[in-house]
Image: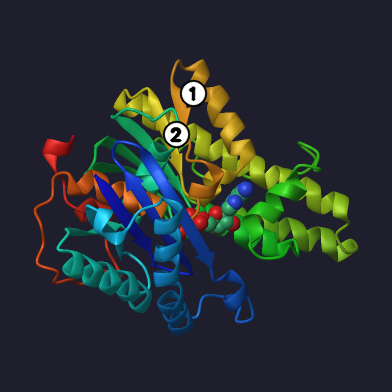
């Protein structure tokens, strides 16, 4: 089954074609980051208008790369939520219009389900069941995944997401946006153990997270140091190193605890913070020591993309009845409500 996937939930237009037999055939992405940078954040109306401009040219580009015509598609998937309402409506209406014209099934996909399943785009593919650590700018969650459509939330952040903490800490250290990658680069030249930051909730006995205290601890550290003199690059790098290690310590400890709690052997890491190389190295070592395996999407599919939506849509369409092209978007939508399909488990 060959499915076209459209991702338009925020500031990235992602389009891809996934074939359940042959894998990913083509994908393309347009990021609006530069357009929103002047405003210091995503402007919803500008985002919607840019998706309108980009989505059809990207569809044509992806089909040309895959050497396919629209009529070769077996279905169309789009991000139905959560996200910005106007941005979501672009993908939803284009997908349904194409489906109606082609008389092919159309399916709305949960954005986080796309992230959760994105490691299935890589080789080797993790087999179900697995524990998934979803770490992005908006989420820090652990799920027990027993099959497509079968997701049990094990733990969640009580305040900031891990990516958000990276971004806010980077800002405190005067690094450019997006802060996560910049902070990670700086941390690479920092020394271990020169400063000390807390590991929030590492020993809380549950699988929840909290990162806002860590950001406050960095603020205190910076203020105290700056009372004497402006921070040197060396001091900044040492703080970045300790911050990254603190986040990685907590994420790794909770991921291992989730494997213990569920008895699973496989850990899947998804979302933008999954691009962090220290996190990858730590999890690989810790999970291997335990006799398990860690799976990641390729770096390109850690952040928002159309490939994960095409993949999730293709896996779902195998079980979904054909719709009537009536659609709605869900700007707020919990993954736990995304529908459990026991046949897909
Ligand atoms: O999944 P994503 O692209 O967007 C959503 O939040 O949905 O994740 C973006 C987040 C940002 O907070 C960014 O700073 C963080 O992922 N990030 C990183 C790295 N690359 C991206 N954080 C730490 N280390 C990285 N290498
Ligand atoms: Zn995302």
Camera-nearest residue between 208 and 312: 312
Task: Find the distance from the CA under tag 1 to the CA under tag 2.
Answer: 9 Å
Image quarter where the C terminus lies is top left
Examine the rendered structure and indicate whether residue 98 appears above or below residue 301: below
Q: Are marks 1 and 2 in contact (CB under 8 Å)?
A: yes
User: What crowding class fits label 2: few (fewer than 14 Cα within 10 Å), some (14-19), or many (20 or more)?
Assistant: many
Q: Position of residue 256 (x, y in %)?
A: 45, 29
| Mark 1 vs 2, N-terminal side | 2
Determine which of the numbered discs, if any, sits on residue 255 in the image: 2
Q: Is residue 241 left or right of residue 25?
A: right
Of the 4 image quadrants, the one containing the N terminus is top left
Residue that carries the numbered disc 1 in the rendered image: 287
Tell which of 254 and 76 is nearer to you.
76
Residue 80 drawn at (x, y percent): 28, 64
Q: For this rendering, which residue is in front, 174 or 25? A: 25
Residue at image position (90%, 63%) is 229
Residue for point 63% across, 55% down: 180
Does 232 sit left or right of 291 as displayed? right
Q: Secondary structure at mark 1?
A: helix
Q: Quadrant of residue 292?
A: top left
Is residue 197 found left or right of 318 in the rendered image? right
Q: Is residue 138 visible?
A: no
């Amino acid at each position: 089954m060959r499915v076209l996937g459209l991702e338009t939930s925020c500031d990235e237009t992602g389009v891809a074609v996934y074939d359940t037999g042959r894998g990913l055939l083509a994908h393309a992405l347009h990021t609006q980051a530069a357009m929103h940078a002047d405003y210091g954040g995503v402007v919803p109306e500008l985002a919607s208008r840019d998706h309108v401009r980009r989505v059809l040219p990207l569809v044509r580009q992806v089909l040309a790369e895959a050497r396919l015509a629209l009529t070769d598609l077996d279905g169309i998937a789009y991000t139905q939520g959560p996200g910005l309402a106007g941005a979501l409506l672009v993908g939803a209406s284009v997908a349904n219009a194409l489906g109606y014209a082609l008389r092919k099934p159309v399916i709305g996909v949960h954005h986080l389900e796309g992230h959760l399943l994105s490691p299935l785009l890589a080789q080797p593919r993790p087999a179900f069941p697995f524990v998934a650590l979803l770490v992005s700018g908006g989420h820090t969650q652990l799920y027990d995944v027993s099959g497509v459509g079968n997701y049990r939330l094990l733990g969640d952040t009580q305040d900031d997401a891990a990516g958000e903490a990276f971004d806010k800490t980077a800002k405190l250290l005067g690094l450019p946006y997006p802060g996560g990658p910049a902070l990670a680069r700086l941390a690479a030249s920092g020394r271990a153990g020169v400063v000390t930051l807390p590991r929030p909730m590492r020993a809380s006995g549950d699988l929840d997270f909290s990162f806002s205290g860590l950001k406050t601890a960095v603020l205190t550290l910076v203020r105290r140091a700056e009372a004497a003199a402006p921070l040197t690059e060396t001091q900044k790098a040492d703080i970045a190193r300790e911050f990254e290690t603190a986040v990685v310590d907590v994420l790794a400890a909770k991921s291992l605890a989730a494997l213990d709690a569920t008895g699973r052997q496989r850990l899947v890491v998804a979302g933008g913070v999954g691009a962090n190389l220290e996190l990858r190295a730590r999890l690989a070592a810790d999970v291997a020591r335990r006799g398990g395996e860690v799976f990641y999407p390729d770096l390109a599919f850690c952040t928002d993309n159309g490939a994960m939506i095409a993949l999730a849509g293709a896996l779902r369409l195998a079980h979904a009845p054909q719709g009537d092209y009536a659609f709605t978007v869900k700007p707020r939508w919990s993954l736990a409500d995304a529908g459990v399909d026991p046949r897909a488990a």
